[in-house]
């Protein structure tokens, strides 16, 4: 059951990344590009976690680093959007 849920989360992140890519292509706003990259990283992270198995202790550092990069991209997108001069 846990592998199924990890697969569903991975698929949901991939769909969100594709939607943000579509929004970026239509608007040209970097905000959507940052979010697409963050969700793609998160989806790939969940896929690798499911592939190796939830009990794998070898991937703990990779899991944390991938989430750190994804959340840093989200924070960078928000800061970029709010501090960019118009």
Image (cartoon, grey):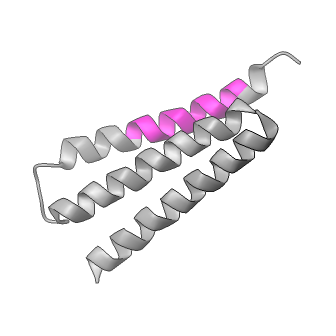
The x and y percentages for residue 45 are: 34, 51
Residue 29 covered by magenta stretch: no
Q: Bounds of the magenta span?
A: 68-80
Q: Is residue 63 above or below residue 34?
A: below
Relative horizontal placement of residue 84, taking residue 1 as reference (left or right) = right
Q: Residue at x 72, y 40 (%)?
A: 25
Q: Nearer the viewer, residue 21 or 65?
A: 21
| Quarter of the view holding residue 1 | bottom left
Q: Residue at x 84, y 15 (%)?
A: 85
Relative horizontal placement of residue 86, taking residue 48 as reference (left or right) = right
**Residue lying furthest right in this view?**
86
Relative horizontal placement of residue 78, taking residue 84 as reference (left or right) = left
The x and y percentages for residue 9 are: 44, 67
Q: Residue at x 51, y 43 (%)?
A: 38
Q: Residue at x 69, y 35 (%)?
A: 31
Q: Secondary structure of the magenta portion, mostly?
A: helix
Relative horizontal placement of residue 61, taking residue 24 as reference (left or right) = left
């Amino acid at each position: 059951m846990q592998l199924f849920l990890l697969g569903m989360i991975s698929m949901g992140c991939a769909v969100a990344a594709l939607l943000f890519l579509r929004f970026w292509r239509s608007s040209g706003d970097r905000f959507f590009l940052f979010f697409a990259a963050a969700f793609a990283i998160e989806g790939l992270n969940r896929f690798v976690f499911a592939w190796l198995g939830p009990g794998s202790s070898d991937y703990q550092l990779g899991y944390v680093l991938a989430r750190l990069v994804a959340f840093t991209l989200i924070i960078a997108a928000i800061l970029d959007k709010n501090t960019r001069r118009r």
